[in-house]
Image: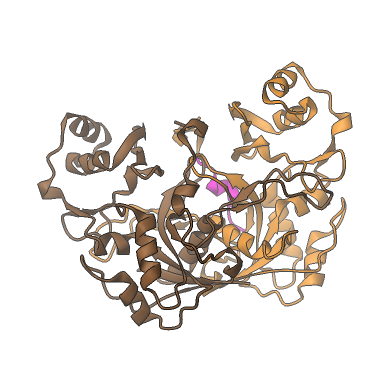
Chain colours: A brown, B orange
């Protein structure tokens, strides 16, 4: 049985805040087998990963893209600054971030940001997850999540962009089906499915709660922090959709 | 709070079986606000969506692709027969199915199939979901799920390929954030996140259980069957990754 519940009562997070301490205060009953899923914005804000639009000087490429897309050139510049590669630039910028994630606008977002500001993804979300895990009572697994669109499907799903102490993937390679044939489905993205389950719980209210706890995944929780969400990045040479 | 639990005790499903009756017998306590998530293979088998490899005559294109990919040409022919379009044919066939879904091998799979056979996706998974919903006690929502790979991420997640009575998407378009700015995340793929949560519950054992019940999504469950999973198919003209 999988159970996902939102944690209520977290205050608005500001730069310098201790996210682990805020979570521990709001939810004293965390256990070692739990998975704490945190919306990345909370982590980004606490880490000061915020840019003021007023301080951004857009370059020529940002101005050209902004004109074509009907966007603020300063916002486009911020997206380019977070990107290793622009994968598509029709209608919306699909970018590969410096972490390797491919998503709209390199994860740069103005919604729920302070006035006149943009929120960026954490610099190193796996390291952020590890820090928060180490500071939480009983050291539950920690996932930092963001909502990503999908290439061919409508709507966004939450996925893991930072992981500490949870298997990113359950690898079925080499396992057999009931008839002894090798399975074609070789790897289930457990951490992404956990982020999705947490998102459903977090959306119980219109405003949304930034943190949820997922129980029932004990067999995927590890003592070691593990390789993190970078294990979910498909290698460039295996990317059929650049 | 979201809760997902696998339903145990379902027998191996055979062509002609009544999936709703099997589920109702295994789980008598379904309620109207529940979401019953069913692995598509169960539905496909019951509907006889099975092809014998021995009866497939591969054409020239299938033979050429099979040689290049190191696959059985009859299996490739079955994939082509289920596809409207082959989106990529390096290493693996990424196809657009006749329903519009983009996935590996058009959903055609040999694992957990009868010996010498392939399992296809249901002909019309939304209609299948509607039929099963209508026949289940208390008429819970029904989702038919399959595991899809993702363009840029390692591993597969379960997604909804058939839906009856559950909002496919929670549309946030026009809603504002806490500061009154319009939100950029406009649509959450609720049905896909429900399929993902159910998948985590179904994988409690190695063998996997084919059906799970997700509770806590009552506000997304509708009396009408609704538009189904076709609402999750991104229109071809909006597809940046053909």
Q: Is residue B50 visible?
A: yes
Q: Nearer the viewer, residue B57 or A71?
A: B57
Q: Quadrant of residue A19?
A: bottom left
Give the overall secondary structure of the magenta segment. Answer: loop
Q: Position of residue B110 (x, y in %)?
A: 77, 41
Report the residue at 33% width, 42% height from top: A98
Q: Position of residue A126 (x, y in %)?
A: 39, 56
Q: Looking at the image, is B179 positioned above or below residue B107? A: below
Residue B188 belongs to magenta span = no
Check the picture and name the quadrant holding the C terminus of chain A.
top left
Q: Position of residue B138 (x, y in %)?
A: 70, 73
Q: Looking at the image, is A234 positioned above or below residue A139? A: above
Q: Quadrant of residue A58?
A: top left
Q: Is residue B173 visible?
A: no
Report the residue at 44% width, 58% height from top: A163
Q: Nearer the viewer, residue B20 or A18?
A: A18
A115 displayed left or right of A99: left
Q: Nearer the viewer, residue B202 or B235?
A: B202
Looking at the rendered structure, the number of numbered marks drawn on it comes to: 0
Residue B230 belongs to magenta span = yes
Q: Position of residue A61 (x, y in %)?
A: 21, 30
Span of residues in magenta: B225-234
B46 displayed left or right of A196: right
B29 displayed left or right of A104: right
Check the picture and name the quadrant holding the N terminus of chain A.
bottom right
Q: Quadrant of residue A101?
A: top left
């Amino acid at each position: 049985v999988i159970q996902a519940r939102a944690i209520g009562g977290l205050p608005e997070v500001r730069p310098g805040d201790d996210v682990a301490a805020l979570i521990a205060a709001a939810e004293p009953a965390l256990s070692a087998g739990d998975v704490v899923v945190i919306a990345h914005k909370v982590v980004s804000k606490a880490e000061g990963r915020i840019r003021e639009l007023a301080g951004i000087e857009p370059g020529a490429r940002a101005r050209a893209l902004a004109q074509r897309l009907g966007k603020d050139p300063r916002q486009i510049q911020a997206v380019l600054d977070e990107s290793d590669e622009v994968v598509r630039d029709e209608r919306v910028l699909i970018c590969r971030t410096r972490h390797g994630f491919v998503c709209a606008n390199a994860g740069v977002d103005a919604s729920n940001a302070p006035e006149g500001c943009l929120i960026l993804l954490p610099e190193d979300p796996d390291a952020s997850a590890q820090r928060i895990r180490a500071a939480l009572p009983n050291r539950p697994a920690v996932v930092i999540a963001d909502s990503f669109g999908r290439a061919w499907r409508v709507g966004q799903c939450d996925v893991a962009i930072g992981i500490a102490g949870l298997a990113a993937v359950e690898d079925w390679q080499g396992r057999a089906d009931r008839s002894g044939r090798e399975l074609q489905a070789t790897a289930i993205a457990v951490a992404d499915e956990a982020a999705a389950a947490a998102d459903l719980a977090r959306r119980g209210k219109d405003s949304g709660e930034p943190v949820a706890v997922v129980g029932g995944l004990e067999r995927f929780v590890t003592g070691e922090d593990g390789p993190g969400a970078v294990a979910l990045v498909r290698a460039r040479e295996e990317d059929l959709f650049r």
